[in-house]
Each structure stands twice: as structure tokens, then as C-alpha cells.
Image (cartoon, helix red, strand yellow):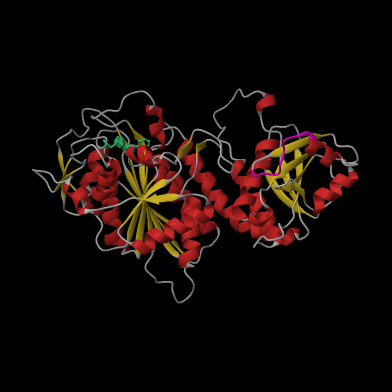
């Protein structure tokens, strides 16, 4: 779907969309349209239950007095509460209602909500951003979709008094959307197509945007002593990879500043290994590389919008398989940090991968801070469902910055505790630690506690995204499937605190 901006005109064909505030209260453009149609808007509203609330819509077909094929009234909620998120969700709603309705072109009349902090161009840009995020589809493997089920909408045009300014404002948001959609593509790919080598190849493509990409192979990982990561990988015929992506965009004078680091779990498929998972729903484990995909998409967004920051992304890519070469429960591995780990459960593999990547990150890049993302535990879904990611941190300020950025972009996180008593649960009688807790409760916390043992005094945060990386139902700006959760959040975190 193409997104364009132009001057307002009522003379266009195709669908026409206009916002309505809670009440329902027509905007200036809405009132003008009501007049042009001989009061059809008012009559339609009176005949319906449309109140102008958020996500509400009312469609008038072939409205008298207009060239438009249909008129979509979209609710914006309370007039004095309309902000960037409300506009993004409205943009998403427009696409949800018009994408498959039949029209090839739709025009949106953009107005600035009277008390909105954004200027008109930013209002248009945010509507377009939401539309772009919602119009995402992963349909490359569908060869038999019926014509009538395919989207018809080819162009979504935003009519706004300052189209050039809106286009400029949208460019920045579009870079973020590009990263989000790239992440969604990677998360959605099946594991026979996307495995460590091919995922590393996707990451390499960031080279064209000015990101310095390096790929470590097995020999290099052996030299570095990454026994924890290699132990997970040894059951699969697909060889593991570690990929580093450096974006050095800091302004003059800060070019040599230590980077902020983003680390991702990239288990391209998690069978559980010898501690094999039940078969029901196992197909979901193709998205066990969502942490890595988020880091790759984020680096793409940062590079595309030329973020003024030094950032490094590192992803640990492995496939967790059972086989005659797989590691066994009870095996003891030596991590890059020198600490030994008794592998009680081969299905607690993500923490083993991250242990070595966290260690490598600190040794090589001496980052100012580290944030890791991982679909780490099913327990985080028990605790938080699909509404928040779990946040763990050794640094209150960092935790607050992440929480604030999440609220602003609508990707919310909830902080959970760390503490001595949890840490004790991963002591092993024969090695420095074991990879699962002894009790049954607090599984997400003991997992985070495990990661913490590989973090020195670097400010660090861990986001457990197992519950938010994949959606089973559509949301305003996120169609069901891979969500790309974390790209918008961390882009905002960077913009607000490091640029
Ligand atoms: N990849 C899973 C966690 C997961 C579960 C991600 C559901 C997405 C949706 C992880 O590797 C895992 O298997 N964790 C185990 C840990 C347990 C063995 C301590 C779990 O959550 O059951
Ligand atoms: Mn697992
Ligand atoms: Zn896993």
C-alpha cells in the first residue's frame, strides 16, 4: 500500500475518511461534508450507535453530493485527549476498514485536534504511521488466496494543508515502521527457511544502510570459549552464528563514545532439545528468535533515520534440536565468562545463549548499558498475559527510562523483582550454577537471575517478550502474527535519552 500526501480537495473519487470526536462532535471538515451531502452525516449518525469513540466507525456508501464512493467516519475519542497514539490508532482503524472494502484509493481529511500538542504535519504523519503499521501483511506463501479476499486499497492519501511538511514528518516515522515490518517478516518466517545462517544473512543486509555487520562462525566462538551457546547448538545440523551490528551515528565530538548495546535471543526453532516440548503448539517456537529479530529491526530503524547515537546490536543465533549430538540433561558446560553451568533442562536454552552473548558484548564493546530482549519463559505469560513485557533491571534509572518510552509508544512493560533468595535457587551442587530454579514458582525471575550472573556492573535490563512477540488477534496498529514489539519502544528510548 502506497502512502501519499496532498492538498485537501473534496473532488476526489475513491473512499473519503474524516474524523469525528466523542459526542459525536463533527469537526470543521465533517460539518462541511454534512452540508455538501444535504445533512446525510447527521442523519446517518442519528440512525446509528456511532458516538465518535476511539475505534468506532460509520460508513456511508455512495453519499449524495460527493464524488466519493463511500465516506468513512472514524472516531477519535475525546477531543482534548487526542495525541500521537490516538492518531496512530485511528490511522490503523482506517486501514482495517478500507483495505479490503473494494476501493483502490482512499483519501483522509486531516485536521489538527484543537488541543493537540502536535502540529498539523505531525498529525498527518501519525495517522499515516498507524496506517502503515496496520497495513502489514505476511502473504508471501499464499498462492491461492481468492481475489475477493485480497486487499484492494493500493493508495492511501492524506489530504493536509501542508503536504510537504507532513511528508517530511512521516519520513522519520516511516523509517521506524520499516524496522518494525522487517522484524515482523523475520519473526513470521518458518524455521526451515530462517535458521542461523540465513538469519545472519538477513542481518548482513543492514550493511547497505551503513551498519557495520560482522558474523562470528563456530571456530571463532570456540576460540572465544562460548561453551554455553555452543552446547545448545550442538544438536542441530544448522551451525550457530553470532552477529554484531554497529551503528556509529553519534554527533561530532561524541564519535568515540561507548555504545549502548542491544542483545537478542535468536533461537530459530526451539524444540526443547532432549527435554523435548509437547507437540501441541510447538510450531509457535519458530518465533523464539523474536528478540534477535527485534534487535535487527531496531538497528535498521536507527540507521534509516540516521539516529545520532552509537549503538551496537548483538544476536546469538542457534537452533535447539534433539539428536545424537544434542546436549543431555546433566551436562556441564563452561561459558565464555569462565563460569560453569549444569544443564538440568535443555529447554531452558535461551539463557545459555544469552549468557555468552552478554559476556562477549561487555568484553568487546564496554557498552554504557545493555538491554537484552528474549522470548525467555512461558512463565512471563502466566504472570503478565499478552499485555506487558516483563522488565528486569539492575538499574532503577534505566528501568524507568524503558518504562516511560514503552508508555509513549504503546508497548508497555511491567517491572518484576530480582533478589538474593531467587538467585540462590540456581546454585548447583556440582557446577557454579544450574540453568533452572529449584522451586516451581517465579520462573521468569530465576531466568533473569541467571542472566544477571553474566552481567558485571554495566547498567542492564532484560525484557522477557515471550507474551508479546506474537499476537493471536488484531490490534489497532498491529495485525495478528509477529508484532515487532520492542522496535518502537527502543527507538523511542534512544531518541529520548541518547540523542
Ligand atoms: N522459548 C521458550 C519460552 C517461550 C514459551 C517462548 C512460550 C514463547 C512462548 C523457552 O526456551 C523455554 O522453553 N522456557 C521454559 C523454561 C523452563 C524449562 C525452565 C519454559 O518456559 O517452560
Ligand atoms: Mn526452550
Ligand atoms: Zn526458547
Residue 206 appears in the picture as rendered: no
x then y, percent, for residue 18: 76, 46
Viewer-proximal residue among 296 and 492: 492
Which residue is at a point 29% across and 54% down the rendered structure image? 358
The part of the image, by quadrant, that contains residue 133 is: top right
Q: Residue furthest left?
A: 430
Q: Is residue 495 magenta?
A: no
x then y, percent, for residue 324: 21, 28
Which residue is at a point 12% across and 44% down the rendered structure image? 428
Q: Main secondary structure of the magenta part?
A: loop
The part of the image, by quadrant, that contains residue 347 is: top left
x then y, percent, for residue 87: 64, 51
Viewer-proximal residue among 394 and 44: 44
Left or right: residue 186 compared with residue 3:
left
Q: Is residue 49 magenta?
A: yes
Q: Quadrant of ligand 2?
A: top left
Q: Which residues are magenta?
A: 47-54
Which residue is at a point 18% across and 33% down the rendered structure image? 328
Viewer-proximal residue among 426 and 315: 426
Which residue is at a point 45% across and 77% down the rendered structure image? 253
Q: Residue furthest bottom?
A: 253
Query: Which quadrant does the N terminus fall into?
Result: top right
Viewer-proximal residue among 406 and 294: 406
x then y, percent, for residue 325: 21, 31
Amino acid at each position: 500500500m502506497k502512502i501519499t500526501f496532498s492538498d485537501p480537495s473534496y473532488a476526489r473519487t475513491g473512499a473519503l475518511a474524516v474524523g469525528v470526536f466523542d459526542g459525536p462532535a463533527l469537526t470543521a471538515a465533517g460539518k462541511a461534508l454534512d452540508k455538501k451531502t444535504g445533512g446525510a452525516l447527521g442523519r446517518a449518525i442519528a440512525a446509528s450507535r456511532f458516538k465518535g469513540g476511539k475505534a468506532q466507525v460509520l460508513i456511508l456508501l455512495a453519499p449524495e453530493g460527493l464524488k466519493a464512493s463511500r465516506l468513512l467516519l472514524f472516531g477519535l475519542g475525546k477531543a482534548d485527549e487526542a495525541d500521537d497514539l490516538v492518531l496512530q490508532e485511528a490511522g490503523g482503524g482506517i486501514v482495517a476498514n478500507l483495505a479490503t472494502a473494494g476501493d483502490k484509493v482512499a483519501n483522509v481529511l486531516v485536521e489538527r485536534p484543537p488541543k493537540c500538542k502536535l502540529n498539523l504535519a505531525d498529525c498527518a504523519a501519525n495517522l499515516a504511521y498507524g496506517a502503515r503499521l496496520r497495513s502489514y501483511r505476511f502473504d508471501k506463501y499464499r498462492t491461492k488466496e481468492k481475489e475477493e479476499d485480497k486487499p484492494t486499497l493500493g493508495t492511501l492519501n492524506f489530504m493536509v494543508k501542508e503536504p510537504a511538511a507532513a511528508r517530511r514528518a512521516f519520513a522519520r516515522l516511516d523509517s521506524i515502521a520499516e524496522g518494525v515490518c522487517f522484524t515482523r517478516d523475520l519473526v513470521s518466517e518458518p524455521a526451515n527457511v530462517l535458521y542461523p545462517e540465513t538469519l545472519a544473512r538477513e542481518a548482513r543486509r543492514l550493511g547497505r544502510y551503513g551498519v557495520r555487520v560482522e558474523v562470528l562462525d563456530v571456530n571463532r566462538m570456540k576460540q572465544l570459549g562460548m561453551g554455553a551457546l555452543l552446547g545448545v547448538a550442538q544438536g542441530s545440523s544448522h551451525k550457530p552464528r553470532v552477529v554484531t551490528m554497529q551503528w556509529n551515528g553519534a554527533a561530532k565530538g561524541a564519535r568515540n563514545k561507548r555504545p549502548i548495546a542491544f542483545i537478542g535471543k535468536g533461537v530459530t526453532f526451539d524444540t526443547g532439545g532432549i527435554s523435548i516440548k509437547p507437540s501441541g503448539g510447538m510450531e509457535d517456537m519458530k518465533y523464539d528468535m523474536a528478540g534477535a529479530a527485534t534487535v535487527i529491526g531496531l538497528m535498521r530503524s536507527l540507521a534509516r533515520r540516521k539516529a545520532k547515537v552509537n549503538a551496537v546490536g548483538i544476536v546469538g543465533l542457534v537452533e535447539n534440536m534433539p539428536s545424537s549430538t544434542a546436549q543431555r540433561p546433566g551436562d556441564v558446560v563452561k561459558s565464555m565468562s569462565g563460569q560453569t553451568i549444569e544443564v538440568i533442562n535443555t529447554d531452558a536454552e535461551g539463557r545459555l545463549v544469552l549468557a555468552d552473548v552478554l559476556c562477549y558484548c561487555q568484553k568487546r564493546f564496554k557498552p554504557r548499558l545493555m538491554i537484552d530482549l528474549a522470548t525467555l519463559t512461558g512463565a512471563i505469560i502466566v504472570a503478565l498475559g499478552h499485555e506487558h513485557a516483563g522488565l528486569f533491571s539492575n538499574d532503577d534509572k534505566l528501568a524507568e527510562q524503558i518504562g516511560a518510552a514503552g508508555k509513549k509508544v504503546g508497548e508497555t512493560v511491567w517491572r518484576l523483582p530480582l533478589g538474593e533468595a531467587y538467585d540462590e535457587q540456581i546454585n548447583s551442587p556440582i557446577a557454579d550454577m544450574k540453568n533452572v530454579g529449584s522451586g516451581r514458582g517465579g520462573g521468569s525471575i530465576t531466568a533473569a537471575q541467571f542472566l544477571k550472573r553474566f552481567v558485571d556492573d554495566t547498567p542492564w535490563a532484560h525484557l522477557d517478550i515471550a507474551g508479546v512477540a506474537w499476537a493471536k488477534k488484531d490490534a489497532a496498529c498491529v495485525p495478528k502474527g509477529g508484532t515487532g514489539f520492542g522496535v518502537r519502544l527502543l527507538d523511542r528510548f534512544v531518541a529520548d535519552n541518547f540523542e
